[in-house]
Image: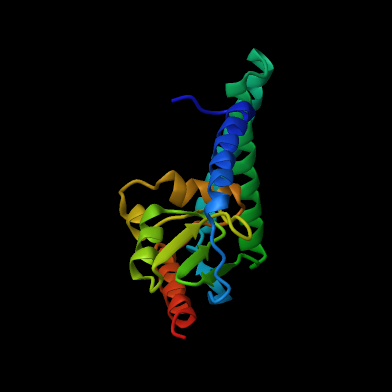
Amino acid sequence: RNCGGFTRTEQEGTILAQAVVQQLPKLQNNPAATIKVKSKIILLPFQPPPAMAQLQEIKKSQVQYFQEAKNKINQTGTTGENQITLNIAQAMLSWINKTVHQVKTKQLSKHLLVELQTIRIGNTAIVAVPAEVFVAIGLSIKKSSPAKVTLFTGYANGDIGYLPDEKAYTAGQPQYETYDAPKYYGTPPFRPHVGTIVINTVKSVLDKLFSA
């Protein structure tokens, strides 16, 4: 598979745009279609942080990892792989420093405020979530939706990172999406039931949008 780079992105974007343009003449106006929009603010809970002693051990290992990454660049130069390693080390070190400070000052957040948006256009529903949502969550929302057609979109009105389903948290070893990725956003990992919270909230809102 050919992937990566702005040239490839532009090619795929052009193909998509051309397909949309071809369909535009086929659109039919329906002035009688019901149009409703509703947003809901929810709280997605974080997992509690490790004990301070464990955090200090993590910080120690991250400082060492960061220093090793810097030394490798000094010795072998700034190659693509070396720079990626350094970027990861910087992100992890920034996360642990922030977490240690927040735990010490008792400023660590227990929840993240998230906006879920739903739109009704006739018999079609559009669900917008500010995250990269696991497929199982989107499929569950579509299955329970009262709309004839339900469109699901991520990265809408912001980006909080991955939103895994509960199964991802029970896959054995911690997964990148559940444990590591949140650190790049400067947050703790979510609790396993956050996907269920989103599913139940969207279902409740869609039921109200389509009840009239």
- Residue sitting at 67 percent across and 15 percent down? 77
Quarter of the image holding residue 81? top right
Q: Residue furthest top?
A: 76
| Up-down relation of residue 6 to residue 147 (above or below) | above
Quadrant for the N terminus in the image? top left
Task: Judge whether residue 107 can be spotted in this image.
Answer: yes
Q: Position of residue 143 (x, y in %)?
A: 33, 66
Is residue 60 among what the camera can see? no
Considering only vertical position in the picture, is 152 above or below 18?
below
Residue 14 versus residue 74 in the image, above or below? below
Q: Residue at x 60, y 51 (%)?
A: 185
Is residue 125 or residue 76 the one in the foreground?
A: 125
Q: Could you tell me residue 128's position as x and y percent?
A: 54, 62
Residue 190 x, y percent position in the rendering: 48, 60
136 relative position to 31: left or right: left
Residue sitting at x 41%, y 59%: 138
Left/right placement of residue 212 relative to residue 91 reads left
